[in-house]
Image (spheres, coloured by chain):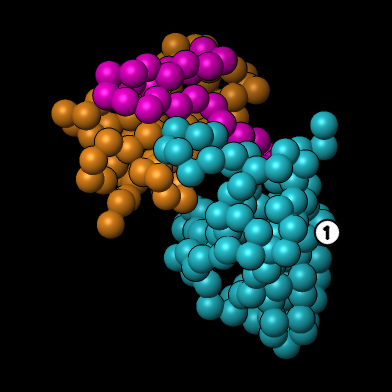
Amino acid sequence: DAGITQSPRYKITETGRQVTLMCHQTWSHSYMFWYRQDLGHGLRLIYYSAAADITDKGEVPDGYVVSRSKTENFPLTLESATRSQTSVYFCASNFDRQHGDTQYFGPGTRLTVL
Amino acid sequence: GDSVTQMEGPVTLSEEAFLTINCTYTATGYPSLFWYVQYPGEGLQLLLKATKADDKGSNKGFEATYRKETTSFHLEKGSVQVSDSAVYFCALSRNTPLVFGKGTRLSVIA
């Protein structure tokens, strides 16, 4: 049972380049989320998706694009990376919108933008 | 909007000491409340949760009680171990994405 995986685990890129972070879950969870974690800010929601082809903005969506053509995948793209996007990115999923439902997190991708 | 406030860290304790990490929330209605833990180099994992007032969540010796009257969900453990060193996040949910506190780093020294 692989659960939720992210790739790559580490990425170094340059300002202005396009970067895609991958997220894959094996549980057929309806909901998937992208967060970024920065010192002093905790976790901030970037985008989330309630189902395939349904996405919505979170707290900090600017500079990011998401898509969800298949239930199990939820890639996050930085169209033109900036230094301020250096962060640790976490993908998460949960089965249902019902509050109280546990959210499961991937291991994270550490992105450095030079 | 909804928000979670948890005590600033870092918190440094000796092994076998008592732990309290304070968490208060602001939300309308009756949110579910969670504590997540993040060990070094890993993603977050659920530690415990409570879905209604007066519920007590517990796991691995940690406990937290959902107090509606004080809008609090403080995390406690009677005797911490070095292996409990991690970052702890309080969070709430109201049929929406989780809202997290900023996290509290705990270091336990032998």
**Chain (cyan):** A
- Looking at the picture, tell me which residue is in the foreground, B105 or B109: B105
Residue in the image at 65% along x and 81% along y: A82
- Looking at the picture, tell me which residue is in the foreground, B13 or A82: A82
The three-letter amino acid code for the residue at tag 1 is Pro
> Which residue in the protein does label 1 denote?
A8
- Looking at the picture, tell me which residue is in the foreground, B60 or A46: A46
Magenta stretch: give its range. B39-66
Judge left or right: residue A15 versus residue B10.
right
Query: On the rendered image, what quadrant is the C terminus of chain B found in?
Result: top right
Residue A105 visible in rendering = no
Residue A7 place in picture, x, y as percent: 82, 57
| Residue B40 part of the magenta segment | yes
Query: On the rendered image, what quadrant is the N terminus of chain B found in?
Result: bottom left
Residue A43 place in picture, x, y as percent: 52, 54
Element type at marker 1? loop
In the image as oriented, which residue stretches furthest toward the bottom?
A: A16
Judge left or right: residue A20 versus residue A93.
right
Q: What's the colour of chain B in the image?
A: orange
Callout 1 crowding tier (Cα within 10 Å): few <14, some 14–19, many ≥20: some
Residue A19 place in picture, x, y as percent: 77, 75
